[in-house]
Amino acid sequence: MTHEVLIIGGGLLGCAAAWHLARAGLAPRLIEARGINAGASGQNAGSLHFQIERRFLEPGASGQGADIVRLNRLAIEEWAGLEEQLSRPLDIHMHGGLMLAESEADLALLASKVARENELGLPTQLLSGAEARDLVPRLAPHVCGAAWLAREGHANPRILADAFAHAARASGAVIETDSRLLDLHRDGHGWQATIEQAGQISTARARHVILATGHWTARIAARMGLNIPLYLAPLMMSVTDRTAPFLPYLIQHVGKRLSMKQTDDGNMVIGGGWASAPQRMADGMPDLDAPPHLVPDNLRANLAVAASVLPCLRGRSLIRSWTGMTCISADQLPVVGQVPAAPGLYIAAGGSMFTLGPLLARMLARSIIERAMPEEIALFSAARFAHLNAFVVPS
Amino acid sequence: MIDIAIIGGGPAGQAAARQTLGAGLSTTMIDEQARPGGQILRQPPAAFAVKGWMAGRLYRPLRRLLAQTEADIRLDWRGGTSVAGIERIEDHFRLTLSGAHGGTLLARRVLIAAGCYDMPVAMPGWTLPGVMSAGAVQTLLKSQQVVAGQPIVLLGSHPLLLVLATQLLDAGAEVAAVLMPQTYGRMARAVLPYLAGAIFTPGPLIAAGAAMARLRRAGVPMMMGARPIGFTGDGRLEAVDYAWRGQVQRIAAQAAAVSYGFLPQSDLPRQIGAAVRWARPAGGWETVCDGAMRSSIPGLYVAGETTGVAGADAAMAEGEIAGIAMALDAGVRPPSGMARAQARRARLQPFIDLLRAAADPGEVWPQATPETLLCRCEDISVAQVEATMAQLSPMADASAVKHRCRIGMGLCQGRSCEHALVRRIAAARGCDPDAVTPFRMRFPARPIPIDEIIG
Ligand SMILES: Cc1cc2nc3c(=O)[nH]c(=O)nc-3n(C[C@H](O)[C@H](O)[C@H](O)COP(=O)(O)OP(=O)(O)OC[C@H]3O[C@@H](n4cnc5c(N)ncnc54)[C@H](O)[C@@H]3O)c2cc1C
Ligand SMILES: Cc1cc2nc3c(=O)[nH]c(=O)nc-3n(C[C@H](O)[C@H](O)[C@H](O)COP(=O)(O)OP(=O)(O)OC[C@H]3O[C@@H](n4cnc5c(N)ncnc54)[C@H](O)[C@@H]3O)c2cc1C
């Protein structure tokens, strides 16, 4: 039989896309090599960051910030409706977020960022150090300002993909774990996939295939002879022991890598884009399946940045650090939609796909259901990299 | 970079250090305790003067080894220091240390001889103050010279309780009773197949007999076939309930020492990805190794109870084997002594099998109720865990359950509850615990104050 849609990967993107497609009656089949949520979707910081991220403020990234704000505004509405759509609690907290400044230079950067965001319709506000400390009294006295966005926050990455998978199954999706895609090639007007399940090899045909395979996407595409400019971003996260609730907000830093929040249970979760080191395979290429090594200097630096703005952290203990991998695209923006050189093949990958995942999965599903890319996300279409596949011979 | 890092200063680590130092390899020994000795010879603080400490005949070889270790100036001893992280980087290892000698340590070869710890057993009332593991009661006694409380009831399936009872009597404590759930008949049937082989290492058997006689003389009731049910008390332990000949009995106690067995320390081997398997009979994960104590990771060796709970004599023999193997693999020592050490280890096996059979909590495992906490760090009850498991697919692994209900997410990172969760998942699936994927072990193996990391 031929599936209408075959989804590869059971992370947030794959599971959410499966739900939207299933609700539209397309009965997708999803195969996941390990378990649902076993990749970046279950390992990330859970930040819902809708202000322009620090990485877009670095020299050379000037244009993208504006593009991402458009998407972020849509994502805010997506998250606000998610618990109702999935009719279950998802630990979504949108009580606000602060991007901090520790110096005059930080403050200047914040001010220009807030002005730009306001122009683009994002209601961030510039706060003084004292105003920031009114919100979070434990902030260090030298924190001299902050950008405040009332609808930022965080959610629980441990449960979200599962909630989508659950809902997708209930709407008729078939979801199979421990099922790995080995090979994918064109077959008439559709695709033929070779799949390994519990040591058994089988094939499946599908009209549309979604590669929702996170940081594996570029390598899978490369095996098919397709160039997708996605690059590995190995990261790390840390969590402390519990403490009484005092921080309902997301904390970021405009000049340094930092994200920080307190979970419902009281633990402090600390990250912000500090690198870990991938394990290497015999040929020197990064091992995409093995957890990267923690980099001790980065762990120290990450915790130091956190404790510098929130000195009370010095009294806490680190109970767990972990590493995970995600990917960023050549221009740091998500890459979503059909790959022009491979009609019927869809991808959805790039940075910050927790914050943007629910929205982009919906858009991706729409582009299959409506046979056209939704106009809202045209800017993020995979077609912008079509030139990279100019010399590909269709297989 | 040093040649050899030895994690654990118990009998296994010490025996290995004798070999590596003898072969001229630079050797660093790291242990959380202030002084070497491991669990069995847990030393009092240096400032204490304790007369006749651990004077028994069985401890003599261990004391001799300890004296040699402490006198050896070639050994780089780092006490009061935990190994929180272990990674293999190219052809060497990086250890992350926390405590008195914090920082990182690079070593060409590593031996994990981290021993074992008391298996926490979730039963009604087990989190009441006053309810302790037998090892904790013994540690207070050996090291701090403190009796945990009295009258004290000793309960569980492990014969270590007999040793502990005599040590408590020697310290002048009031031992109210020793409750062991196996009947004499069951215990005899279990050990019979191993008795003939174990007769070649009669020391511990004679000691067990002597301990029972000692209890009898002291008038301590030693009740075989008494099944512990749970603990009661208002804010702290007041009594222990047990079933005896079909009736529920209650015995007053200020303290209780529980022992159903020991779990091998497995956090560091699992963090670095060494192969482990489910340990018998009590459970937990023992690290797989070859006859020369090499783990599945090149350059990483394991010895002592990290490889399975087998007692101090086996730990010493395994440490010696590992030490010789490290020297051989480093190419600095002619191959001698290996066969002798391996034969010594092999001779101990019948007794080890006998002890495991005798201690097996198999069908006498205590029952938890739905309200009993399985995870005491995060206050997760049996009922919550079962409800979570019911929502998941039967193939869900331990981490999936953890992510949903927070079992194992607290300060101990699952050291206490993981074994119980794995057993429950295995029972629900009708498979062997070995087939259940356990929690993923991560850095740090022990909580580290953030202040210490930042410096
Ligand atoms: C440490 C860390 C912190 C982060 N913090 C944030 C944050 O705070 N906010 C934010 O917005 N984003 C954050 N991210 C990024 C975010 O987590 C990812 O962008 C997002 O989860 C990607 O989801 P995904 O479904 O595309 O990929 P994944 O969750 O990685 O899912 C891909 C799935 O595909 C499966 N797969 C791969 N190959 C095959 C195959 N051949 N056959 C079958 N299945 C296969 C994998 O097993 C995996 O389950 C963070 C990422 C990391 C690593
Ligand atoms: C509490 C307790 C009491 C015991 N009492 C007896 C007894 O009375 N009689 C008996 O025959 N057997 C007893 N045993 C069993 C006993 O442990 C073994 O027989 C023997 O000591 C094992 O030797 P070993 O070298 O394998 O480990 P151990 O003697 O346990 O030595 C391991 C050492 O490693 C250290 N360590 C572990 N992890 C780390 C880390 N991450 N970083 C730094 N250091 C670390 C520990 O502090 C410990 O000192 C007891 C076990 C326990 C747990």
Image (tube, rainbow, N blue to C red):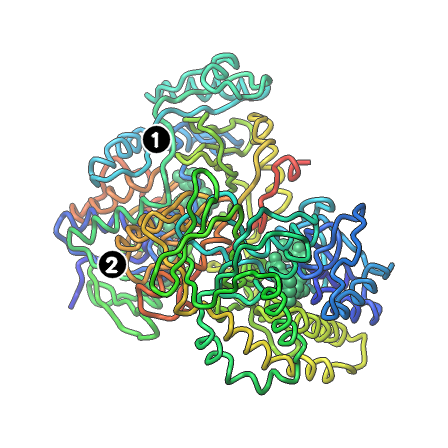
Residue at position x 38%, y 60% from top?
Answer: B243
Q: Amino acid at mark 1?
A: His
Q: Which of pointers 2 and 1 indicates the residue nearer the eye? A: 1
Q: Marks 1 and 2: in contact by CB < 8 Å?
A: no
| Badge count | 2
Foreground of the two, A261 or B13: B13
In what quadrant of the picture does the N terminus of chain B appear? bottom right
Q: Quadrant of residue B323?
A: bottom right
The mark that comes first in sequence, 2 or 1, is 1
Q: Amino acid at mark 2?
A: Ile
Q: Which mark is residue A93?
A: 1
In what quadrant of the picture does the C terminus of chain B appear? top right
Foreground of the two, A230 or A170: A170
Residue at position x 46%, y 56% from top?
Answer: B121
In the displayed orientation, state which residue is furthest to the left.
A25
Foreground of the two, B343 or B131: B131
The answer for which chain carries disc 1 is A
The answer for which chain carries disc 2 is A
Q: Is residue A387 visible?
A: no
Residue at position x 82%, y 59% from top?
Answer: B70
Q: Position of residue B314 (x, y in %)?
A: 66, 73
Q: Residues within 10 Å of mark 2 (few under 14, many from 20)?
A: many
Q: Which mark is residue A175?
A: 2
